[in-house]
Image (tube, grey):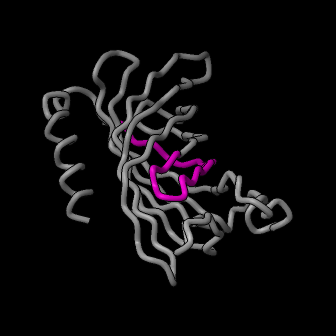
Amino acid sequence: MKRAALFLALFALAAAPAFAQSSEFGFLLGGSKRLNDLPGAKGNPGVNDFKFSNSVKEAFYAVQLDPGTMFKIKVGQITAPLAVKDSSGSRVDAGKGNIDHVDALVDYQFPEPWGSTGLFGGIGMYRQSVTGYQDETNFGLSGGVNGDFPLSRRYGVIVEAAYHWLHMDARPRYLTLSGGLRISF
């Protein structure tokens, strides 16, 4: 956990000059799915089906670097079936657990008649916790698309689809779909 806090502090310090520009924060709620390539797990409905019971909760703070470019610090938790390596080195389904993450993202936004769309990508720290197995922490990559539908100059509804690739022993990958509220100031 100390490494994740240090990672977050480093990115916040690097983005300090941008805090004087416009910024926004928000939260997202949605569902998640582990993209499965475990041998023999194709018929397991708990792994292959997208369900909102496999949840994602995220909050972010973003600052504008250039017009149409935002730097985001995003924290969140993905609840989904987890994959781990057992003592023999084989990938196994470990049941449902949590993945906590802190990401540093660059979001490129494109104006549209109804708001904006965006492409984002970045690096983060991920911690996988599942009962019966040792917690694992390592870096990961995330990227995706989003849309912002403004309600007013200050508030907007956002939707997002993100892909998370974790550099854990079992190399799990997750897809998240979420929506939420954005507040600009």
**Residue 59 image point, x, y percent:** 41, 52
Q: Quadrant of residue 172?
A: bottom right
Q: Is residue 104 above or below residue 129?
A: above
User: Is 174 a magenta residue?
Assistant: yes
Question: Which residue lies at the image location 40% right of the left edge and 18% below the top edge?
Answer: 68
Q: Is residue 29 above or below residue 116?
A: below
**In front of the other: 98 or 145:** 98
Magenta span: chief secondary structure: strand
Q: In this view, does 43 lie above or below 32?
A: below
Question: Which residue lies at the image location 64% right of the left edge and 57% below the top edge?
Answer: 31
**In front of the other: 3 or 154:** 3
**Residue 176 image point, x, y percent:** 60, 49
**Residue 55 image point, x, y percent:** 60, 63
Residue projecting furthest to the bottom: 132
Q: Is residue 19 left or right of residue 106?
A: left
**Residue 145 image point, x, y percent:** 57, 32
Question: Which residue lies at the image location 38% right of the left edge and 35% below the top edge?
Answer: 105
Q: How many marks?
A: 0
Q: Is residue 138 left or right of residue 21?
A: right
Q: Is residue 165 left or right of residue 7?
A: right
- Point out the stretch of residues depicted in magenta: 165-184
Q: In this view, does 108 lie to the left or right of 54?
A: left
